[in-house]
Image (cartoon, rainbow, N blue to C red):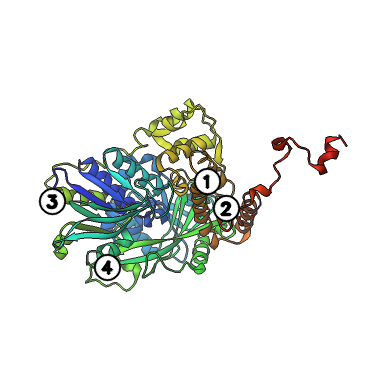
Amino acid sequence: MASTPHVAVVGGGSTGAGIARDLAMRGLDVTLVEQGNLTHGTTGRMHGLLHSGGRYAVSDQASAEECIEENRVLRDVAAHCVEETGGLFVKRPEDSEEYFREKLRGCEACGIPAEVLSGREARQREPYLAADVEKAIAVPDGAVDPFRLVVANAASARQHGARIETHSKVTDLLVEGGEVVGVAVEHGAKSGERVHGVQSGREEIRADHVVNATGAWAGRVAEMAGLDVAVRPSKGVMTIMNVRQVDTVVNRCRPKGDADIVVPHETTAILGTTDEEVADPEDYPEEQWEVDLVIDELSELIPILAEARTIRSFWGVRPLYEPPDVGSEDPTDITRDYFLLDHDDRDGVPGLTSIVGGKFTTYRMMAEEIADHLCARFGVDADCRTADVPLPGSEDVDRLRDYMDEFGLRSPIGRRSVERLGSRADQVLRTDDPNPVLCDCEGVTRAEVRDAMDDVGTDLNAVRIRTRASMGNCQGGFCCHRLAAELHPDHGEATVRDSWDDLLQERWKGQRHALWGQQLSQAMLNYALHATTQNRDRDPAAGGPSPDYEAFDDGRRATGETRPDAAGDADGD
């Protein structure tokens, strides 16, 4: 073993990025590999709830206590990623009074601040709540930006010496003498300059230890070493509305089930969710009945949702795991707790540890536990500091208002820019270049886009998750081409087109389940704009023979000649 242990972390979601940061801050040599963008898997496909623990206060009090503990930590160290919305568990007439009292007792037992509100008091906070909501329990739920949080963790890990490789798929685990000694990686699933790290080719990354933090994919990665990790992926739909119908997280106060939560997120509200076990975390049906269910059920709590504009739907897969001897038949019964599986202790295969299960809110706690485990194994004497050291952007959020004044950012657009950037606002926005808004829906300026491109190169989807550009009402109809234009002239035409196509495809796939009413009109308008002004429906550069540019008229300025049919113009007729 080298003097400084080298750990390869597989998985660039919240847990993987959190582990990389924790280990790097303790002085270990870390390489993180992710098959897609950061947040490619479960983390990038969640509703953005920062749990108070209230949802688990009856059914899983251990998880509830972990959630309220981490809720408080993240409000401190990731302040620029968290919106302190508060949360309500609301009771309708048909909901159980006994369950309401049980929820309240559970919150108190788990140390979750809880306040009972009358129906009138709840509607004073959220005017669109249904008139027959009888009462509610107020808890410290919040909204969190998962993209911003993971990027901040990865950035911090890199600042402490970690190597971050995205678009780098692990194709095999290296096993020698019954021990895992590294990973085989294929860099860059696509050509061009859109890979964060090594751009293309295969590489064997040897390491003293490999951490499998791939969530719903953990079983597949473990299988590469002949190990059985029985992850039970469960899909759930999230549906995004065009505006924030609520400013508070609204939960239905009943035993956990489908379609019982609305999370305000940036300029939108996200409705969720369903819970259906699936065999494959990448290939499962996305069914319209799930979308209809969440809208119908949640309209009982917030009637305005029934007529509101839906802009897209997406599905995520929970990385659920339960020990082999449990065997729950209903996925809603599977614990949301996490498990650390040291495959030396468990299976007699040293060199590999898997971390499975868990929730986004507890990612940092999971990372701390596995980092403690590895430091003990390697004899490294270093304490965890991730609960105390702010993430990049959250070092001094009290200065946000000072930045707004300094840069004259009194408009909502300016405020949103500063809130997204946190303490990095000065570094990013202090520019002498013109700084127009490129994404009108989300108010994203050129300076933010350029800053993201400095970090991720030409990957426009990676720019999207860092800035929110193209994630608003028009779903990129009016800004995707502007983002692509920012890549010119630093990058070649083929690379720009490739990245632009990927962004359009990413934006389109979520709209397929929202094509009715105003969003159908928006999709048709986007199609017309992209087809008639950008040739996106029949791009001559997309394939087939090259255009015969010689056949085009060179124009009078180029040749110095007057066309015969233009002689009249030349004569002044």
In the rendered structure, find residue 230 and report the number of the disc placed on it.
Answer: 4
Q: Residue at x 69, y 47 (%)?
A: 552
Q: Label 2 is placed on what type of residue?
A: Ala
Q: Residue at x 52, y 29 (%)?
A: 433
Is the residue 278 above or below the residue 503 in the image?
Answer: below
Q: CA distance from mark 2 to mark 1?
A: 10 Å
Image spot of residue 319 (x, y percent):
33, 61
Near mark 4 (Cα within 10 A), the count class, few <14, some 14-19 or many ≥20, is some
Q: Nearer the viewer, residue 76 or 201?
A: 201
Q: Secondary structure at mark 3?
A: helix
State which quadrant residue 160 falls in. Answer: top left
Residue at label 2?
A: 541
Q: CA distance from mark 4 to mark 2?
A: 46 Å
State which quadrant residue 236 falls in. Answer: bottom left
Residue at label 3?
A: 377
For the question of whether residue 68 can be seen, the reply is no
> In the rendered structure, which disc, 4 or 2, sits on the residue that comes first in sequence?
4
Q: Nearer the viewer, residue 446 or 42?
A: 446
Q: Label 3 is placed on what type of residue?
A: Arg
Residue at label 1?
A: 493
